[in-house]
Amino acid sequence: MEGDARQAIRRAAEETIAAFGVPGLAIVAVRGSQSVASLFLGTDAVGSPVTPESIFPIASITKLATALAVLRLVDANAATLDDPLARHLPGAAAAQPGVTLRTLLSHTSGLPLDLPNAASLYVAGTDWPTLRQACLQTPLRWPPRTRVQYSNVGYGLLAAVVEHHTGQAFATALDSLVLHPLGIAAYLGVEPPRAPVVLADVRGPQAGTPLEPFNSPFWRSLALPWAGLLTTAAGVLALVHAFLGVPLSFLRLQTLVEATRNQADDLGGGYAPPLVWPRCPWGLGPELRDEKAPHWAPSQASPTSFGHAGASGCVAWSDPTSDVTWAILGTRTADNGWLVRRGPAIGAAILAAR
């Protein structure tokens, strides 16, 4: 039966590659401490094989790392979850009544999805300090705690809070607070020691230019605290495991409980259509599965399962009820819908494996 289950995971992966033009996939999964899947199939967009050492741009899974940095500051008593943003960044336009670290982490602050002037800022010469200033100048779009609106800006402000308390650039602080303690080889704002995966199907006006998202040194240099991290499949798995208390000394138990429970009550919202739901539970960083449809996690996962996805074509998820955690990283962006349409099939096969 074990062999059949692992073959089902491979079949789901191979069907994804064939049906959606994904050049390659990395799939890792564990049940407890036992490996359920370790598959590295195909290549990236330029023919380099996908291996355990492949370094992927993990897009918005970066937000898990940023959230962990903030939670580490909370555990160190440098901040509390219900601190008003104004206590830490009084000059921020979003530092309004009701905007707290908790609302920023759970996307309930009322900030927009992205910077209002994002397109004009994405030009040669832009850097993280420039983008940080733009985050500080971005006002609320809605009153706090009236909806869930996934927000890159909110995580930019959280990175600015980390910088304020550590006196370090966010990339440096992230390494000392999160990446090094977790033993993760990951890179933010610097070129990795070997060539990263090149993604297929990058879209937008900068596609094919020196400013191409995900694939260009320029994009990597921005050190985006909401989308810029690069790491391996094992690194992604370690980020999710941190929310499960691995290692035990990394976060306090009460912090872990808060991080993985619903902070959004019954508010609706989400990303952008069609990924908007009547009820959109969210934790302090991780998204919660609940009954959302469509979704990249399978319906077989428990409603309290959690994780994050990335537009670069990746998802990391954990179902504590089944004691299963997995990561799926593709070498094609999610723009053609493959992650939502095939991620659940791969996840279901992983959950069924014993």
Image: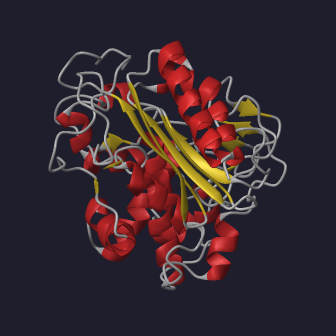
Q: Position of residue 343 (x, y in %)?
A: 60, 32
Q: Is residue 142 visible?
A: no
Q: Is residue 104 above or below residue 248?
A: above
In the shown orientation, is residue 132 left or right of residue 2? left
Q: Foreground residue, 80 or 24? A: 24
Q: Residue at x 36, y 20 (%)?
A: 202
Percent position of residue 209, x then y: 20, 18
Residue drawn 78% across and 42% down?
A: 300
Q: State whether residue 27 is above or below residue 102.
A: above
Instruction: Using the image as rendered, state which of residue 229 and residue 141 is in the foreground.
Output: 229
Residue lying at 57% horizontally and 20% vertically, measured from the top left: 337
Residue drawn at 71 percent across, 54 percent down: 305
Q: Total number of numbered labels? A: 0
In this view, 49 is above or below 158: above
Q: Nearer the viewer, residue 100 or 319?
A: 319
* Residue 25, quarter of the rendered image: top left
